[in-house]
Amino acid sequence: MRIKPFYFIVTLSLVFLLFLYGGGDFRRHTSKTIIFVITPTYYRLTQKPELIRLCSTFSLIPDLHWIIVEDSVKKTDLVTQFSMECKVHITQLFAASPKVSRPIKGSNQRNRGLQWILENVKPGELKGVVYFADDDNTYHPKVFEEMRTTKRGSTWPVGLVGGRTWEGCVTDCNDKNKITHFVTTFRPTRKFPIDMGAFAFNLDLLHAHPNASFDYVHTEEQEGLILSQLGFNSAFDLEPKASGCSEILVWHTKTQKPKVSKESLSDPVPRGCNATAFRGSSV
């Protein structure tokens, strides 16, 4: 039986789309370095627009697997729907923060993301880099290509952080591969005076140190905590990226909390015949 050209073309197109977007399967890129991006997120009015901003950036990056971890006791409809719409390979997880007196934002969610990688990627199965990207930051696509060549751990400056226009590494004027010091305001003498968005590490290190994790004790020291557990003695052990730490490719750009009336909070869906179509579109 001969297959009609029309049906053949349709079938071929569907196969191509499944290959392009299907299943979030990062293993089809086994010959390339995969960037595993772990993003903690929690519900607020600006959650979806901020995730959409990240999606717009991540969709430009090849061979990227986005692990979104909700601070929740279950997956929410908002993030589930978003994950279906965003054309990025996404794994949606959840991990509620413990009820402690001084919770450290994102620790439990980052740990869940690391756990998922260890459970789903075997040692030596593929080349990879791990990065923690908060959902309220802004990222230049170039930073992901910079971190992709990370041998052990890498670092770069971050803009609009710590009450400064930027913080981070500074390299030797005659050797861009040598870090001389770090610019920071908060406790500049600490071993790892860098921001959470200022470093990435090779996947092999996670497999070599599977117990490396964040906690709820070391306030303002989570970066140093995870890096020290991965085998680094100080931030000077990291490879300087971003043209020898001369470019800012990550910014802390927190969205201003919107001022909305109590009435609109009780009824966030537009009234009228199109109410169903708008449900969940922004909140």
Image: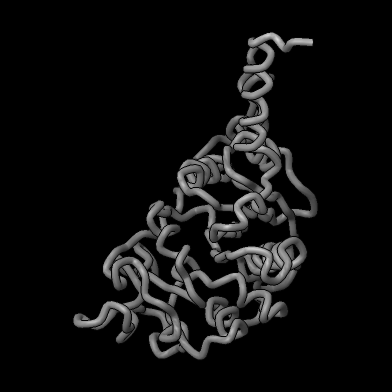
Give whichever of 157, 188 is nearer the camera: 157
Q: Residue at x 64, y 24 (%)?
A: 12
Q: What percent of the width, then of the height, locates residue 40?
A: 62, 58
Res. 186 image quadrant: bottom left
Residue at the image point whose x is 53% and y is 82% from the top = 224
Q: Percent x, y for residue 216? A: 67, 76
Please, is residue 153 above or below residue 228 in the view? Answer: above
Residue 48 lies left or right of residue 243; in this view the side is right
Whole-percent x, y for residue 197 in the image: 47, 66
Q: Can I make out residue 186 in this image?
A: yes
Q: Position of residue 42 (x, y in %)?
A: 64, 52
Q: Does 25 sit above or below residue 165?
A: above
Q: Is 31 left or right of 212, judged from the image as shown?
A: left
Q: How many marks?
A: 0
Q: Is residue 118 above or below residue 58?
A: below
The C terminus, quarter of image: top right
Relative to 117, 187 lies left or right: left
Image quarter where the N terminus lies is top right
Q: Residue at x 32, y 83 (%)?
A: 178
| Rendering colour mode | one colour
Q: Quick check: 174 above or below 5? A: below
